[in-house]
Image: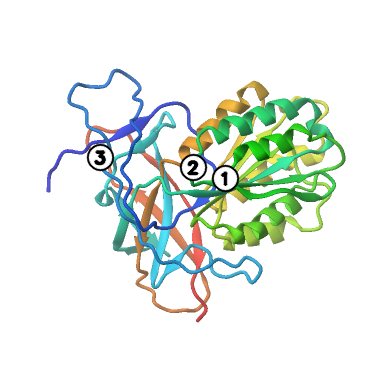
Amino acid sequence: MARRQSLLFLGGGMLLVAVALAGEDKTKKDAQQSQTAGPKPANAQTAAPRRKAPTEEPANDLATRQPTLRVDTNMVLINVTVTDPLNRFVTGLESENFKLFEDKSEQRIASFASEDAPLSVGLVFDASSSMGSKLQKARLATAQFFKTANPEDEFFLVQFNDKPEMIQGFTTNTEEIQNRLTFTQAKGRTALLDGIYMALNHMKKARNTRKAILVLSDGGDNSSRYTETEIKNLVREADVQIYAIGLFEGMSGRSRTPEEMSGPGLLNDIAEQTGGRHFPVENINDLPDVAAKIGMELRNQYVIGYIPTNANRDGKYRRVQVKINPIRGLPTLRAFWRQGYYAPAQ
């Protein structure tokens, strides 16, 4: 059936941050207009209205490691970000523009939404000694990220050096977190993995169904109790998207430690499993802009729901793949999504 598509490209070289999406029980209109690479045609249309998403969802208990992506009754919900070749967000797509597979078996899309629902976000902030010259820019980055927040969003702050510390629990007042960061001093080693673990554990107190963690760090881990394997397994199960901003010196930097050399790979592996992304930053002056773009990306994701054809409640990990059907007149689009989920065990 032929019909006219109305697609919007949200401008800027965009990055991606980490949020698991679930449905909300009210319809929201898409109030944001896109920014195009050139002048907007006179007959251009806005994105399609936001649709309702499924409302019912089970609680997520990280302590007992329950299955990850929300399984609402029998429905699995997956959040998807779509970008064009210039890394701009693409909005206005419809369900027929997507194909979804579970373990290589195509699934029927049962629900589709594109709404800016409230977020619960944990900020994991590196305060180790190597962050000394970068602290001010890192504070500015968080301020820019918070500018994209909505009134119903909530945030918490985990800070780490030798060990992680819960600095601020969930709050809707972003100034509370910024005030706390004002007194942050750089010292000690880097317990990055322990910081992520603490944030994942605290996230089970979130009141919103969409959850994300934003990590700001300048290197790998050298002080954690938890191992890389343990954290990778945990994030694979957790119902949270993780985005990471890595503050690294250039590859030629003589002061780069072995831990810092492994940092980009570690952050990338952790973020990728959750449907988020890692953004390495070598020029710290770019940091505030990167953080703001991550905040924008959280507002421009699709939620695709399907009822798996595999009805076995075997607790096994199932791989998910999302494809975008070619759209006439548009370049090849790229999708980012969570790589899989654990089926219910009972």
Name the one closer to the observer, 184 or 124: 184
Q: Is mark 2 on a helix, strand or loop?
A: loop
Identify the amino acid type marked 3.
Ile
Residue 54, position as x, y percentages in the image? 36, 61
Residue 76, quarter of the rendered image: bottom left
Between the C-alphas of marks 1 and 3, the distance is 40 Å
Identify the amino acid type marked 2.
Pro
- Give the numbered dot on residue 327: 3
Pointer 3 with pointer 2, Cβ within 8 A? no
Residue 70, position as x, y percentages in the image? 47, 64
Colouring of the image:
rainbow
The residue located at (34%, 54%) in the rendering is 26
Q: Mark 2 points at which residue?
A: 151
Assess disc 2: are there few (<14), some (14-19) or many (≥20) residues with their C-alpha within 10 Å of its C-alpha.
Answer: few
Q: Which of marks 1 and 3 is nearer the N terminus?
A: 1
Would you say 105 lies left or right of 162 here?
A: left
Q: Earlier in the sequence, mark 1 or mark 2?
A: 2
Q: Which of marks 3 and 2 is nearer the N terminus?
A: 2
Would you say 297 lies left or right of 54 here?
A: right
Q: Mark 1 points at which residue?
A: 172
Identify the amino acid type marked 1.
Thr
Image: 340 above or below 256: below
